[in-house]
Image (tube, grey):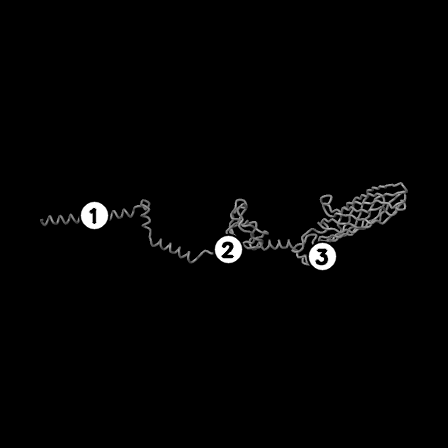
Amino acid sequence: MTARAWRNSVALFLSVMLSLFILGGHVESASAQTPARNLPNRYLVERKPAQRKSTVRSKSTVRKKSAPAKASGRFAVVVAPSTQIYEKPDLDAKVIATVQQGVKIPVSKGTRGEFAKFHRTRVAGRLGWVLILDVKPEAAAKKVLAEVQAQAAKPGPFASDSDAETDADNGEPSDGSSRKQREPFAFSRSVSLVLGQTQYKESVGGQDFIASLLHYGFKITGPDILFSGPLMDVNVVLHYGAPPYNEAMSSIKPSGFVMWTDANLLLPVFFRDNTLVALGVGPLLVIANTQTAQGDQTSSRWRTELGATVELTAGHRFDDISVRLEGKYMFEDKTYHQFQLAIGTVF
């Protein structure tokens, strides 16, 4: 090869290499200016700085470990006499536990339930649901429970002076647990046997006679006796035998009876748990029969009178036994009075 041909070959080779070098730089510059949205996602992931991603994740991990979440406990106190814990937030759900008044239980901040609202709770290791109406936050629950206790300790209108004191009526402690809760004596019902004396007056043949007669019978006292509501005293008493003044009118010992029936409306004027003083007024029915004889002739005399009764009664209850003392004025054809003692049982 001549020297000239050699020089031409070298110049051609250098020209080709220079062209390739320039072409390669142009292609690389065009690739760098291509928009990122035209590249596949896998290239975008690969082009993200791996070191920065790792650093962020590491900081997040460190933050979670260094600042653990606190268990924010929220408690409520049962203010209902007792509340049920349901398996689901539904009143028709299965009851899994019962909690009494004053017990503190954990509850959720939120509520659930379509109609009735429930808090999530845990009782005896079991998760359940409690009605929000049955529980209150601790601060509010103290006030509610104090009001409940004050209401329970407050005496009623017919209560004795103090439940902590000894009951003067029966000599037993009034501790509320051993004492039987019942209505005041004035508004309780009782049935009694009656024994008494009547200063009986009667007019026979135009003459007035008087005799002291022993009578006995029974009585029912209390509300809802004949009518619903009013306090009443119903008496049925009898003297068996003719009044003594009839002996002068008969050749043999006369016989007969006198029966008094009255139904009085009682108006209490003083009463305590086991004591009653009352005035009564009501209608009176008197039925009397006397049989006498003069020789072979016998006669039977009947007398029926309507009148009124005014009474003063004082009674006391010993446990389930009632004792009453009563004085009455009887207004019928004649006016006279009765005194009687009644001992009965309260029901």
Q: Crowding at label 3, few (<14), some or many (≥20) Cα neighbours within 10 Å?
A: few
Q: Amino acid at mark 1?
A: Leu
SS at circle 1: helix
Which mark, residue 170? 3
**Is residue 60 or residue 148 the one in the foreground?**
148
Q: Is residue 42 left or right of residue 80?
A: left
**Is residue 254 or residue 13 the one in the foreground?**
254
Q: Crowding at label 1, few (<14), some or many (≥20) Cα neighbours within 10 Å?
A: few
Question: Disc 1 designates what residue?
Answer: 20
Q: CA distance from mark 3 to mark 2?
A: 52 Å
Q: Amino acid at mark 2?
A: Gly
The reply to whether callout 1 and callout 3 are in contact (CB within 8 Å) is: no
* Residue 213, percent from left and from top: 84, 49
* Residue 200, percent from left and from top: 85, 47
Q: Is residue 25 left or right of residue 4?
A: right
* Residue 57, percent from left and from top: 38, 54
Quadrant for residue 163, please give it.
bottom right
Residue at the spot x=21%, y=48% of the render? 20
Question: Disc 2 designates what residue?
Answer: 73
Quadrant for residue 302, please give it.
top right
Q: Nearer the viewer, mark 2 or mark 1?
A: 2
Q: Amino acid at mark 3?
A: Asn
Q: Earlier in the sequence, mark 3 or mark 2?
A: 2
Q: Earlier in the sequence, mark 2 or mark 1?
A: 1
Q: Nearer the viewer, mark 1 or mark 3?
A: 3
Which mark, residue 342? none
